[in-house]
């Protein structure tokens, strides 16, 4: 794992968008795995700016997850989030973007077809990830199988509470989601996880320094050969080897020894 600690959330999210833009520049027909959540909003804001100079016309994308029961035009659906945050502002072709359909007649079939579509596209070059405060990636809650494929998951009370702020007052956070599996995520050729804020510090420490365990699904990234973790000071605040990460990557800079 490459652990990069930046001085602020702004610098961490800017670094994430730079990574994505440089991949799109180097490989205009790349396949991106995209994430949602508050952490990603500044990442997509920076991408919208940078995308003026770099075309996404050849890019394909697959999103991590969607709430079961929400149609694409629902205000809290991840379809809507992606349209508002990114897709409507860049030249990516709508037919090249893939977000699981929360309103599919059979969510299980939708999940299976989603995995097949990723495989048919030749896999994901770079998977962007956020981190749940309970260590989830996508909607793979603690004790998800570390080999799981895209499927329907029941959300924990904690996740539903964390995400309630995004729903209208009195509106229930859905109980189920379709999410890429942990095994599906691990097949991406590169992983870029962004976590900001002190409320993520425990999950970050468990992910990077804890034992690999389904108790913290993100800890499986320790097995990924090309995983980069971008953190701000708050998210890095519970790391035991903090000095070492700073020594290896001063100010979160990637040092290439050739
Ligand atoms: C959500 C999403 C995840 C996201 C995480 C963190 O529930 N399913 O993909 O990474 O929780 O969200 P936030 O960035 O808002 O803290």
Image (cartoon, rainbow, N blue to C red):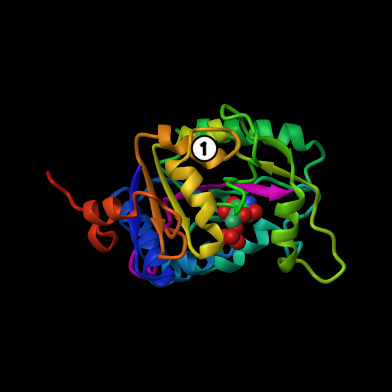
Q: In this view, which residue lies farthest toward the left?
A: 258
Write the residue at 77% across / 55% down. Answer: 71
Q: Is mark 1 within 8 Å of ligand 1?
A: no
Q: Is residue 210 magenta?
A: no
Q: Is 183 placed left or right of 23 in the picture? A: right
Residue 159 % position (x, y): 70, 53
Question: Height in image: 102 above or below 197?
Answer: above
Q: In this view, which residue lies farthest toward the top?
A: 147
Write the residue at 29% across / 52% down. Answer: 245
Q: Is 83 placed left or right of 160 in the picture? A: left
Q: In this view, which residue lies farthest toward the right?
A: 170
Q: Magenta stretch: give its range.
A: 50-67
Residue 190 % position (x, y): 38, 41
Q: Residues within 10 Å of mark 1 (few under 14, many from 20)?
A: many
Snapshot quadrant of residue 233: bottom left
240 vs 151, nearest the viewer: 240
Question: Height in image: 17 above or below 220?
Answer: below
251 vs 86, nearest the viewer: 251
Reading the image, the residue beneath label 1 is: 185
Snapshot quadrant of residue 7: bottom left
| Quarter of the image where the N terminus is located | top left
Residue 143 % position (x, y): 65, 34
Location of ligand 1 given as a quarter of the image:
bottom right
Write the residue at 27% across / 57% down. Answer: 246
| Quarter of the image where the C terminus is located | top left
146 vs 128, nearest the viewer: 146
Q: Is residue 56 magenta?
A: yes
Tell me, yes or no, if residue 93 can be seen here.
Answer: yes
Residue 236 % position (x, y): 42, 58
Snapshot quadrant of residue 162: bottom right
Write the residue at 22% across / 54% down. Answer: 247
């Amino acid at each position: 794992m490459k652990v990069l600690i930046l001085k602020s959330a702004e610098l961490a999210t800017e670094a994430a968008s730079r990574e994505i833009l440089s991949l799109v520049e180097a490989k205009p027909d790349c396949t991106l795995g995209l994430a949602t959540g508050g952490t990603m909003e500044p990442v997509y804001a920076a991408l919208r700016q940078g995308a003026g100079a770099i075309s996404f016309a050849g890019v394909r994308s697959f999103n991590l997850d969607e709430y079961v029961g929400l149609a694409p035009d629902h205000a809290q659906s991840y379809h809507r989030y992606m349209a508002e945050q990114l897709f409507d502002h860049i030249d990516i072709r709508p037919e090249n973007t893939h977000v699981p359909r929360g309103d599919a007649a059979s969510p299980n079939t939708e999940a299976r077809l989603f995995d097949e579509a990723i495989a048919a596209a030749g896999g994901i070059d770079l998977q962007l990830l956020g981190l749940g405060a309970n260590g989830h990636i996508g909607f793979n809650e603690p004790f998800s199988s570390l080999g799981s494929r895209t499927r329907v998951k029941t959300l924990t009370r904690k996740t539903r509470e964390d995400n309630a702020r995004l729903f209208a007052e009195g509106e229930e956070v859905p109980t189920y989601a379709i999410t890429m599996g942990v095994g599906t995520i691990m097949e991406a050729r590169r992983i870029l996880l962004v976590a900001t804020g002190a409320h993520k510090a425990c999950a970050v420490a468990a992910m990077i320094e804890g034992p690999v365990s389904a108790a913290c699904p993100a800890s499986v990234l320790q097995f990924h050969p090309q995983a980069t973790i971008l953190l701000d000071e708050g998210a890095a605040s519970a790391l035991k080897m903090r000095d070492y990460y700073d020594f290896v990557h001063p100010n979160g800079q990637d040092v290439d020894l050739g």
